[in-house]
Structure formats: structure tokens, C-alpha cells
Image: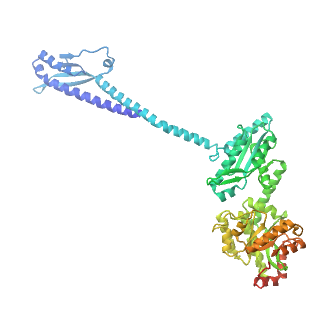
Amino acid sequence: MLIMALLLTLLQYGQLDLRLRHDLNTRTHMIARAATAAVVFRDKRDAADILRAFEDAPDVRSARLVWPDGSEFVAYARAQDSSSWLQRHAGDTTARANVVANGTVQAQLVVSASRSGLWLALLGIMGGALAIMLVALAFTRFLSRGLRAKVRHAEDRTQYLAHHDALTGLVNRVAFSGELEHALAQAMRQRHGASLMCVDIDNFKQVNDTHGHGAGDAALQAVASRLSALVRTSDVVARLGGDEFAVLLHAPVAEDVVQYIAVAMTEEPCTYLTPTGATLQVTTSIGVAMLPRDASEADAAMRCADVALYHVKRQGKNGYAVYAPDMGEALRQRRRTEQDLRAALKQDQIALAYQPIYDRDGRLRSFEGLARWNHPERGWIAPSEFIPIAEEAGLITGLGLACLNRLHCDLGQWRRAGLPAVAVALNLSSHQFRGEEDRRAFLDKLDALALGPEEVEFELTETAVFEDMDKPESIVNILQTRGFELALDDFGTGYSSLAYLLRLRCRKLKIDRIFVDGIATRADARLLVDSVVRVAHAIGMVVVAEGVEAAADQACLMELGCDLFQGFGLSRPLPPDQAARCLADHARDVRVFAFGAAATLST
């Protein structure tokens, strides 16, 4: 704006200077023509009177009529104000005009004018421009004050978000790392203990999948508030990402105080309201590292707390654990198993063992296919060890596809050996179908291997409920639409209800071994199994008793009306070649059953 004002001032100066020169030249030529007669007749009085016409021009300082030889004929001079600084320093502009008579120059009129008027006009213009500029600046400043406040607020907000979590208001991972390093240095310098707690919300993904992300956000905010309320103002609570939180208890803090906080956080669920008004509860798992006892560096401290947290997760969640060195070895073993399992899925190390399922007359009716892993160095690894790891590491989808491949190969060998077809039941985990791509891959594999309802059945574990089974795109509905039979496995160990049985509409119900073992001498187990069998038969389900080991238990189960039986007392899970021999031994029964001659099971 100042530059524009200067440019405008220079432009005005040029215009005023041009106007001053033009006016002075015009006036000078007019007076020169008027003085012609006085010059010709050399009448000084008339000439002086004519020059006094310049009195009407306040800028003119002097006027002189001079002869061609330079001598002065007559002159006019205005009285000057010597006290005026501007008059003394403004400068002059000179104009000349010839006095001509009969085509001859008789004399010359020389007029000198002060430039003070020009400078006064220019100063007035500059003052006006400056006033306008100041008004504009003041107005702009007034208008921009609110904008500057918004910009400052945005900058402050950006700085805040760089170090805090937007949802919970807690510090984020970046800021927490600095706090942890500072706390470690302080604890080592003062030789007082500090503590780091890693906190996870149990089954958080299930909250999002079942109740929506709004409910998940509400759970995160509730846990954040609960943690903040339990610690001192000097302590730090952070959200590291997802459902992961961390609590830093600055030194000095005693281990019993840490345990008190952990117990207070885990002894009862955290209750909160969802955006829809529903009341939900979540539990937490906590891993604790004591500093600097367990670690003297920030990364090592986080690893120790994570190891303790993983230990809690393996023990069933909803609890806490303080880090111990032997926990690290368990985690390293778990990671090695995960890496080896990834390789096993690529190298076709997964096999199936087949446990026969018999009817009341001892005839073979089907197999249950159980995943087995023959590690090249460690030998056979128990399913209880590698299946939970597969679910946690996101490998369960690949494991399910590997089981389908192995079943297809084994069935092909049996078919080429001339053995009759028999259905094989495979377990399904709800973790296999978290995403649409997982569901699609499973169904595409069934189609590619041409595995139909005659070759394979599927068992749903009750403790892994399929939350989306009421939706048309649910894997449960899709499999039933395609004609596959479903069985509800481990019945009685989860959260089943009659409504759940009616919704699921499985063909079979498998009673868990905890009710079967010793049932011949357990009145409470007999009562429960009798009730389950009656309900299952009432809604058209076939009842399978799992874990049958004693003949007395089998006799009791038959008396109660169970239809099918499996367990070590009848047969252990068999490798494919032994399962083929079992199938050959029962070939006639299988063929008769397949053609429907004995398709109606006794109840």
C-alpha cells in the first residue's frame, strides 16, 4: 500500500509540474503580447503597469523585460516572506516569451515563479493519500483481528493434535515416548521406581462389528476416563492407537500402588452408553513393567509391558500381570510358532486326522476332520497351541483353506481306492470370515475343489458366535442355502439359548465332553443332558455326544437318547491311511446309510 501511495504521489507531482509550466508559459506569452506597444514606444510606465498584472498570480516572484542585448528595460518583483521556509527552498520555474513587432523581436519577457504552490498541493495530496492509507490499515486490522484469532486457534489446535488423540483427549504415542524417556531418566537419577502399564480393551473388534464404530468410540472414551480418574495428575495416560492405552506412573510409586490401580481397572467391567442409548460393558487386560527394574530404555520398557499384556491375553483376558523374565521366552516361542505356521501353510505341512462318529449300533456314520501340524523339527504340534495363534495372527483363513485342500486330496485317494463316500465335518471359526474377501475366498475354494454337501459338513463352535448370521451374506446362511449341513459344536460351554438354537437351525448338536465324562455317576450331568436331548429332538436336531471314553457313559447316553457318539473310547483321531481302513471295514454300513435304507436314526 505504501508503494502504491508513493507511485501515485510521483504521478501527481508530474501532473502538477506540467500544469505549473503550462499556466506560466500561457500567462507569460499573454503579457508579452500586451507589452508590445510599450516596448516599441519605450514607455516604461505602461510597461511597468502591464507587468503588475502578475500580481494576480501569487506564484510569480519576478518579471523582467530585457532588450536583445541583455539590458533590462523594466522589471516587476513581488515582496517575499523571508520567514517562510517553503518559499526559500521550494525552487523556481522560469518562462520566457519574445515581444515581437513587425516580425522583429523587440524584447524578451522573463518570468520566474515559485514552486511552493506545487509542493503545497502535492503535500495535500500526499496527506490525503496517507490518511486514506491509515484508515484502510486500521479497517483492515480491525477486520483481520478475528481472522488472526482463528489462525492462531488453528495453529494451536494443530499443535495440540500433533501430541494428543482427537477422540479421547489423551496424549498420543509420539508425546508419550518423550514422557517415558523422561520418566526413566528421572527414576534412574533419583533411584525411585516408576511404572509403565499397557492396557488393551478385550474383544474390542467384536464391539465395533456388533454395535458399530460409534459404540467402539464410546468404549474408548469410557476407558480413557476411567484410567485418568485412577491416576495422579502428575501421571500420564496415553492412547497409543486402536484399543491400546498406556499409563505412565511417575516416580516415586510403589508396586502395591500399581497393583491397586490395575485391580481397580480390571475387577469390574467399564460401563458406558452408546450413541443409540444402549448400555454396554467392556473389560480390559493390563501388562505392567516396573522401571527401571525391568528396563532402562523406553523401547525395552514397552516390550516388557507388552509381554506381560500378552501373558494376560493368553490366560483368558480381563486381568493384569507384572512382567517377569520368563514371560519373554513364552512370547518369543509364540512368535517363532507364528512364523513357522506361516511357512507351514505355504509348504503344505497341514494334515487332517479323522475321528469316526458312530451310531447307536456301532455303525460308522461320518468323520470329524481335525487339523494337525507336523513340524519338520518339532514334530506334531497340538491344535490347542497353533489354532489360537492362527486366530490371533490372522492366519485362520489360510488354515481353513489348507484343511479344505487336504480333505479334497484324502477324499480323492479314498475314492480311487473304491471306498464309499462319507461326509467329513470340519470346524469353522468366526475369525475366518471377518472380511468379505475371506468369505469369498472360502466359497471359491469350495467351488474349485468341487466339495459338496455329500463330502463335507461344517461345525460351528458355540464359543465363537457368528454375530452376522441373521444377514443374507452371512457364511452360515450361504452354506445352508447351498445344502451343507451344520452342527453346533461344544454345546453348553458358551452362551447358547433356545432362541440361538432356533435362529441357527443346525442339523446336529454336539454335547461337550465336560458333560459326557462320568455322566453314568453324575446326576446333575444326566439331568442337563436329558434336557438338551429333549429340546434338540423337539426342534429336529440330531444329538452327538463328544468325548465318550467309558462304556458305562456310552450306555447312559444311549439311554438318554443320544443319536451319535465319538471319543477315545470308540476311536482316536486316525491318519488318512488308517481312516481309509476304518472306512473299508464299515463299507457296507456306509453304503446302506448313504442309500437311505437306514437313514432314520433312532431317538
In the displayed structure image, the side of residue 80 where residue 589 appears, left or right: right
Dividing the picture into quarters, in which one does residue 430 lie? bottom right
Q: Count every numbered label the image shows and give the total.
A: 0
**Residue 447 in view here:** yes
Q: Nearer the viewer, residue 600 or 224?
A: 600
Dividing the picture into quarters, in which one does residue 495 lie? bottom right
**Residue 444 in view here:** no
Image coordinates of residue 537 in percent, x first then y, are: 76, 74
Q: Nearer the viewer, residue 139 or 325?
A: 139
Task: Classify 127 as above or below 580.
Answer: above
Q: Residue at x 66, y 64 (%)?
A: 468
Image coordinates of residue 460 in percent, x first then y, are: 74, 68
Q: Nearer the viewer, residue 353 or 268?
A: 268
Which colour scheme appears in the figure?
Answer: rainbow
Image coordinates of residue 218 in percent, x first then y, are: 65, 51
Q: Residue at x 77, y 54 (%)?
A: 317
